[in-house]
Image (cartoon, helix red, strand yellow):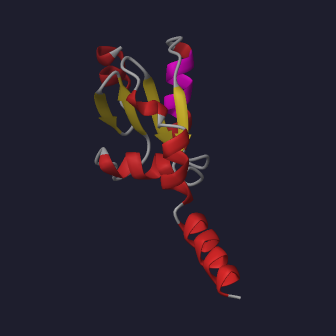
């Protein structure tokens, strides 16, 4: 019975800390130099405008939905994210929808 209790507690701890465990096996991609990362949500109108601007400017980017990706949400907060969109263009952070700042950072 004690082995079952230990196994159950281990499984529970693993489940509660899955984001951390996942990072051991798959480091976050945001650390790639020169990458453009958009931290956004699906419902955000300014996020949609940012996507459109990136497409219009033909900029390849990776999007992280901060409501669905817990590791991405942690990175968003660590970068000082207060609202969406937050755009990381090769290390330059742009808070909100700002086409001029985006073009200056490309």
Asked if residue 24 is positioned above or below residue 58 in the image, the reply reads below
Q: Quadrant of residue 93?
A: top left
Q: What is the span of residues highlighted in magenta in the rendered image?
A: 49-55
The answer to whether residue 70 of the structure is visible from this angle is: no
| Residue 70 location (% of width, % of height) | 52, 54
Relative to 10, 4 lies left or right: right
Q: Nearer the viewer, residue 93 or 74?
A: 74
Membership of 31 in magenta stretch: no
Residue at 53% x, 16% y: name it. 60
* Percent x, y of residue 61: 52, 23
In the rendered view of the protein, which quadrant contains the C terminus?
top left
Q: Is residue 54 magenta?
A: yes
- Chief SS of the magenta region: helix
Q: Residue at x 50, y 22 (%)?
A: 53
| Residue situated furthest bottom in the rendering | 1
Asked if residue 41 is positioned above or below residue 51 in the image, the reply reads below
Residue 105 location (% of width, % of height): 31, 18
What residue is shown at x 55% (from left), y 70% (from top)?
A: 13
């Amino acid at each position: 019975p004690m082995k079952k209790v230990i196994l159950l507690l281990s499984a529970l701890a693993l489940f509660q800390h899955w984001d951390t465990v996942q990072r051991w096996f798959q480091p976050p991609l945001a650390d790639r130099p020169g990458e453009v990362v958009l931290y956004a949500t699906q419902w955000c109108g300014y996020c949609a405008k940012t996507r459109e601007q990136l497409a219009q400017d033909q900029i390849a980017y990776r999007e992280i939905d901060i409501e669905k990706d817990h590791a991405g949400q942690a990175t968003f907060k660590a970068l000082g994210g207060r609202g969406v969109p937050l755009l990381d263009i090769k290390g330059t952070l742009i808070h909100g929808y700002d086409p001029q700042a985006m073009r200056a950072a490309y």
